[in-house]
Amino acid sequence: MSQILIMGAGAMGEAIIAGLINSGTAPSSISVLEKRSERSDEICVQYGVRKLSAIAEVSGFAAIFLIVKPQDLAASVAEISDHITTETVLISLAAGKKIAGIESGLQGKKIPVIRVMPNTPALVGEGMAAISGGTYCNEKDLALAEKLLNGTGKVIRVEEHLQDAVTAVSGSGPAYFFLIIEAMVAAGVELGLTPEDAHKLSIQTIYGAATMLRDSGKTPTTLRENVTSPNGTTAAALKTLNESGIHEIFSAALEAARDRSRELAQG
């Protein structure tokens, strides 16, 4: 495996490192560059990866993951631009930052840039990431990014203009799931269950349903219909949800997330 650099060793940076190692990348092939020395030391001890101590050392990597705060991205790109060539693929996980902005900071070098929208389940190896290639990306570059990200979950390719929609569906999506669990637990408690039992019932039900959806090959519509007996308890609950406008609520929520993503990209 070629050498890989992780710039930014926060929670998502650590998730990428763990995913790489779990999918077969040798720790010796991974380096970390992190402003907080104590954090980089911690990561290096835990995973056996190499610590970089200076920007000048970033040359020669096959791929560099930019996992920095969005407001720090331009400065990070400027710092490394003198030391990298077109042989390096830049993979940016900086939320809302467009490829053109990264390319403009590379001093005219035709360096392949790939934009990634991950989500937090990557922290447990069950993430969903969408990648978009820049002006100078080819199939080999995109395939490399997919291979490197596969250890954190699933990966799809989308055109960059769809990244705001991806953010609305999967980037912010885990929070919708957590909100639904909160609501189910609270409703269960109102029905007389203990908080502990309501919590366990809700989580396992959602987990089991998601596993069925993933592994059965059936559509969510088919699975919903299979569990909904005419005039039964599930039908009564779904009738209430539909009358409350659940589809319209989710549509409005995702549009709001998409619009906010667009606004942040302009900032």
Image: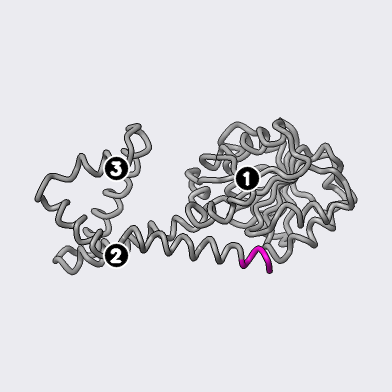
Which amino acid type corresponds to the residue marked 3 in the rendered image?
A: Thr
Q: Which residues are magenta?
A: 263-267
Neighbours of disc 1 within 10 Å: few (<14), some (14-19), many (20+): few
The residue at 31%/60% (across/down) is 246
Earlier residue among tags 2 and 3: 2
Q: Quadrant of the N terminus?
A: top right
Q: How is the image coloured?
A: one colour
Q: Which mark is residue 221?
A: 3
The residue at 30%/49% (across/down) is 206
Residue 255 placement, left or right of 91: left
Query: Dot 2 corresponds to which residue?
Result: 183
Which amino acid type corresponds to the residue marked 2 in the rendered image?
A: Ala
Q: Nearer the viewer, residue 106 or 257?
A: 257
| Residue 264 sits inside the magenta stretch | yes
Rendered image quadrant of residue 49: top right
Which amino acid type corresponds to the residue marked 1 in the rendered image?
A: Glu
Query: Dot 1 corresponds to which residue?
Result: 159
